[in-house]
Image (cartoon, rainbow, N blue to C red):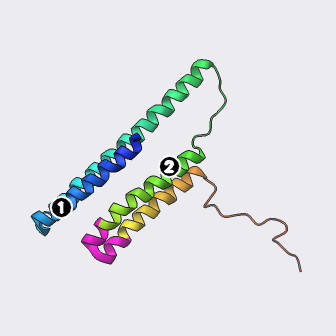
Amino acid sequence: MTAMDARESDLKKDLDATLRARGELGEEYESALVESFLEKVDQRIDDAVERRVRRQLAEQQMTAARGDRSAAPTDSWGERFGFGIVSLVLAVPLSAIGGGIGNLPGLLVAWAGIVGVNVVQAARTDPGLFRRRKPSPEDVRED
């Protein structure tokens, strides 16, 4: 079992425990349970980001120590793929929580947040993605 599988398994266990606790405790504790679960998810995200930042800093320090000044790409296909996978994995519990608490509006808010995070990631990865394309000479016709 890889570390990522273990983290996903732990997250599933936490979600199951939260849902069972909600069933046992009733709706009056629902917001506290959701907040607790989201804090765990936030902590896992923070830990993953911290590991990634430490790894990139170590790579930069190694590059500087070697005297190699060539710029390495800041993200790769694997990083983008991993971000997409994490986004989809987190979409499942967020959809369940948003839909369970707020029905359709809650589900829409959850997915608006998921889409927003992915749009920001896409803009960071490709800064020119959302810029207006300047018309090329072939696009402009003179009549």
Q: Amino acid at mark 2?
A: Gly
- The residue that mark 1 highlights is 20
Measured from the top left, where is residue 137 in percent x and y? Answer: 84, 66
Give the residue at x 59% y 44%: 76
Nearer to the camera, 8 or 36: 8
Dot 1 lies on which element?
helix
The residue segment tinted magenta is 97-108
As drawn, 13 above or below 142: above
Give the residue at x 53% y 46%: 79
Nearer to the camera, 28 or 4: 4
Q: Quadrant of the N terminus?
A: top left
Q: Is residue 17 left or right of residue 77?
A: left
Measured from the top left, where is residue 123 in percent x and y? Answer: 56, 55
Dot 2 lies on which element?
helix
Q: Is residue 56 left or right of residue 42?
A: right
Alpha carbon of mark 1 to alpha carbon of mark 2: how far?
Answer: 30 Å
Residue 107 quadrant: bottom left
Magenta stretch encompasses residue 98:
yes
Measured from the top left, where is residue 80 in percent x and y? Answer: 54, 50
Nearer to the camera, 127 or 1: 1
Give the residue at x 31% y 45%: 43
Disc sitting over residue 82 in the figure: 2
As drawn, 133 above or below 43: below
Q: Amino acid at mark 1?
A: Arg
